[in-house]
């Protein structure tokens, strides 16, 4: 229950930070499959610096609610879209609760012959030295193929895997599988 309150608090902090910061640009992302839904909101707080976060709810392997807040350095051109930085992830699962500070980012390459299509992915690793409560370490990664439907909307298909190791338990897959999603740029 405490972890659930932490995730709700994290969500409130993300929303407050997003609304109070004078965002220059940003995006809202929603993806799902038959057993999970994930939403994310990001805003540029200064040129090339993005603050955001998201929530994942999954019944894929067990009951999992996970939230994250991240601060990334970003760059987007007609050839690529990249971001690198830090992410705090908080987990509320049937196997343990806890959070940690990880590093990672994302990268997408726009195909020269099809500039509306981009391929890439993301990944974040949280080592045991930067965790709290039951969490010993975790990682999340995903691959996506994106298509720009209109100027400010991308649709995509992809794959996501989230794994975590909780104290006195083996490493567990919390969520994995194919997904579909849309991302709105603003």
Image: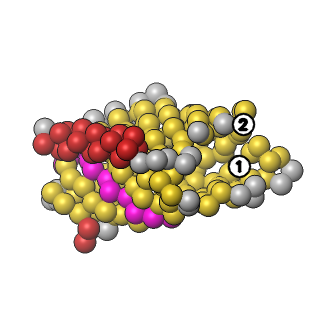
The mark total stands at 2
The residues colored magenta run 83-96
* Residue highlighted by disc 1: 118
Mark toward the start of the polypeptide (2 vs 1): 1
Look at mark 2 in the image and give the residue it sits on: 151
Q: Nearer the viewer, residue 25 or 169?
A: 25
63 relative to 23, above or below:
above
Q: Quadrant of residue 130?
A: bottom left
Q: Residue at x 28, y 39 (%)?
A: 12
Q: Residues within 10 Å of mark 2 (few under 14, many from 20)?
A: few
Q: How far across and down, in percent of the image, does residue 98 sit?
A: 21, 53
Colouring rule applied to residues = secondary structure
**Residue 63, position as x, y percentages in the image:** 27, 35
What is the secondary structure assignment of the residue under circle 1?
Answer: strand
Screen quadrant of the C terminus: top right
In this rendering, would 116 be left or right of 27? Answer: right
Report x, y in % for residue 14: 34, 44
Q: CA distance from mark 2 to mark 1?
A: 14 Å
The residue closer to the viewer here, 80 or 16, is 16
Q: Is residue 82 above or below residue 33?
A: below
């Amino acid at each position: 229950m405490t972890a659930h309150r932490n995730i709700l608090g994290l969500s409130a902090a993300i929303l407050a930070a997003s609304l109070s910061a004078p965002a220059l640009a940003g995006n809202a992302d929603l993806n799902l499959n038959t057993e999970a839904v994930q939403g994310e909101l990001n805003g540029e707080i200064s040129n090339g610096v993005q603050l955001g976060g998201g929530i994942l709810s999954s019944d894929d392997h067990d009951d999992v609610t996970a939230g994250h807040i991240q601060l990334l350095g970003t760059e987007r051109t007609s050839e690529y879209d990249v971001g690198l930085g830090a992410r705090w992830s908080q987990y509320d699962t049937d196997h343990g609760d806890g959070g940690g500070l990880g590093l990672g980012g994302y990268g997408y390459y726009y195909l020269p012959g099809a500039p509306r299509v981009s391929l890439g992915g993301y990944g974040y690793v949280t080592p045991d030295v930067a965790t709290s409560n039951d969490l010993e370490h975790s990682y999340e990664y995903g691959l996506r193929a994106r298509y720009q439907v209109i100027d400010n909307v991308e649709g995509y298909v992809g794959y996501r895997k989230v794994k975590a190791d909780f104290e006195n338990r083996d490493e567990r897959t919390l969520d994995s599988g194919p997904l579909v999603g849309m991302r709105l740029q603003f």
